[in-house]
Amino acid sequence: MDNRETAPVMSMKDWLITLLITCIPMVGFIMLFVWGFSDTANPNKRNWSRAALIVIVLSTVLYFVLIGLIFGAMMASGVFEGL
């Protein structure tokens, strides 16, 4: 037997509203958590929210690693010695 969830298809209007909400600073970030971990959210929106949160975490980690590498290279080259 197939245990997959059957959910209504999200319309283009639903996706547009979802994307507009996520563009609002802080509100969008909070809504990603609400949609991602809610049992009542559409499974399509829930999976998309979880994927978006993973991308945000990976991007943030990559950002800090690159900043650390750049700052470390600058320190090693002596850029800040004369300051």
Image: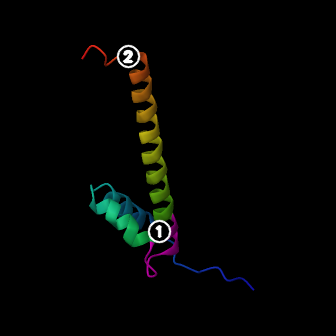
Residue appearing at x 41%, y 71% in the figure: 35
> Could you tell me the amino acid type at mark 2?
Gly
Question: For this rendering, which residue is in front, 9 or 1?
Answer: 1
The residue at the far right in this view is: 1
Question: Which quarter of the rendering shows the C terminus?
Answer: top left
Q: Are marks 2 and 1 in contact (CB under 8 Å)?
A: no
**Position of 37 relative to 71 (above/below):** below
> Could you tell me the amino acid type at mark 1?
Lys
* Label 2 to label 1: alpha-carbon separation: 49 Å
Residue appearing at x 43%, y 28% in the figure: 72
| Image depth: mark 2 or mark 1 in front | 2
In this picture, residue 62 sits left or right of residue 78: right
**Position of 72 relative to 81 (above/below):** below
Question: For this rendering, which residue is in front, 79 or 3?
Answer: 79
Q: Residue 33: image x %, image y %?
A: 39, 68
The residue at the far front in this view is: 81
The residue at the far bottom in this view is: 1
- Residue 74 is covered by the magenta coloring: no
Range of magenta residues: 37-47
**Position of 26 relative to 41 (above/below):** above
> Circle 2 sits on which residue?
78
Q: Residue 38: image x %, image y %?
A: 43, 77
Q: Residue 8: image x %, image y %?
A: 51, 77
Indicate the quadrant where residue 41 lies: bottom left
The earlier-in-sequence mark between 2 and 1 is 1
> Circle 1 sits on which residue?
45
Residue appearing at x 49%, y 57% in the figure: 54
**Position of 30 relative to 58 (above/below):** below
Q: Residues within 10 Å of mark 1 (few under 14, many from 20)?
A: some
- Secondary structure under tag 2 reads loop
